[in-house]
Image (tube, rainbow, N blue to C red):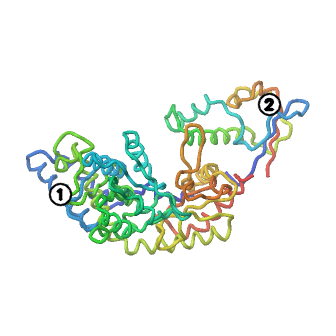
Amino acid sequence: MKSIYLDYAATTPVDLDVMVAMQPYLNQRFANPSSMHQAGISNRKAINDARITLAQCINAKPEEIYFTSGGTEATNWAIKGYANTHPEKKEIITSQIEHHATLHTCEYLEGLGYKIHYLPVDKYGFINLKKLEKLISGNTLMVSIIWANNEIGTIQDLKTISKICQAHQVALHVDAVQAFGQLTIDLEFHQVDMMSLSAHKFYGPKGIGVLYVKKGIKLTPLIHGGAQEHNARAGTENLSGIIGMAKAAFLATQRQPDYYPNLLNFAKKLYLRFATDFDCILNGPEVGPKRLPSNLSISFCNLLGSQLTYWLDQNDIYVSTGSACNSSSIEPSHVLKAIKVPENYINGTIRISLGKESLESDIPRIISRFKEGIYTVSN
Amino acid sequence: MINIKYFIKITNKNEKSIFQGKPITLPMKEKYITEKCIELFSDPDPCIIHQSYASQKLVDYFISLFPSLPLIHFSLSGYSKKLDFINIPNIEKYYLTIEVK
């Protein structure tokens, strides 16, 4: 029986049109974009055209788009690069529910003497905006916030966060890795200083991302070497990746007005079945405008998510747990701890994430598999 | 795989309990978990989540050794090699009960 993939927040398959766009750049149009011959020059143009496409997708300027190896590099660069250009400011404000790319970068800076403020969140995962405003001081280097949470789908009020940061003249970096493709991104409206994106979350290839850097914001490079990306990010460009990312971003932006309501309807129907048939709770906001439409983080009472995930895996349903690796034990993730999921539910957390190939006709099979799995792994 | 719950008891000849619990709670030797991780992930230094996945694979293997279930007070004599991954010394001297729900 065909497997049911419900792990689109982890990664998505590459769109066929994206593959077709990328293919010539793997073996025919392979020239180094820095080479000063026709083949290289035409690839330089292709990269800059991709930059224009990306910029259009988020209503930014092409010179504000820098290609990276992915979302993690983009976030590392935004935080470390901005810290290096403003050594006089030693405090960073972030939240308790950031992706590890942000948290571990902040921890690294903490080791160098920075003070990191981790904003608490409420039970739905929303940061306390008053607390944010209160924490900002003359020592604040920047604020770094995940727009749409990768585990529980909480969508932060970015416009208000941006207004607070602007009012205090503090730089704002936004991790929009999960948001792109599902939410409308208009940087003229949202006014952020830096934003991380990753292609493989929206049907593009792995190993390519973007850091948007608002004109006027200065970052030191993370990677030193050649003059690529206007001397800001060295290394021969991931040409096929860049082409693929631009194509994927274009398609995702075109698709978004239909994609969002389709996912939302699917999530509503699927969650209704879970809520009716199981002793479970939904982590994060209710299914609706404040939650990523693709995300259902569900905690089941008195069971182990890792065992249920394994059982589902052996029965062709692919989901994620809400667990994190510790050196000696499997623990609930920092996000689930931060929103204080009740003790008898927290270990039984499963993240279901929907995508464009998810089928509503699979809902009965999904529910039936969960019923069997929960029966099998529960005490 | 179907939705079946197993409960395991390992006892000595006098039916004194050596182990009882769900299959996943069977004590397993680290060496075999690492070997399974190498087989599954080509990773000799697996994280705890990968170790947990490998342990579940070993449990599946354990259950597959006994095609006729349930089992009641089944002698494990002759199973010492096959069950060497279980961290119970001299397991071949014991008896296995597998309850099926």
Q: Is residue A63 visible?
A: yes
Image mark 1: chain: A
Q: Is B73 left, or right, of A344 in this rendering? A: right
Image mark 2: chain: B
Residue placed furthest toward the left: A37
Q: Is B13 left, or right, of A161 in this rendering? A: right
Residue carrying label 1? A48
Q: Residues within 10 Å of mark 1 (few under 14, many from 20)?
A: some
Residue A253 placed where, x, y %?
32, 68
**Closer to the camera, B5 or A336?**
A336
Amino acid type at mark 1: Asn
Residue A224 placed where, x, y %?
22, 40
Which residue is at 43% across, 52% downward? Answer: A117
How far separated are the C-alphas under marks 1 and 2?
69 Å
Amino acid type at mark 2: Leu
Secondary structure type for disc 2: loop
**Closer to the camera, A187 or B7?**
A187
Which residue is at 60% across, 63% downward? Answer: A366
Residue A59 placed where, x, y %?
25, 68
From what the image shows, is residue A287 above or below residue A172?
below
Q: Is residue A357 visible?
A: no
Residue A60 placed where, x, y %?
24, 65
Residue carrying label 2? B76
Which residue is at 48% across, 65% downward? Answer: A294
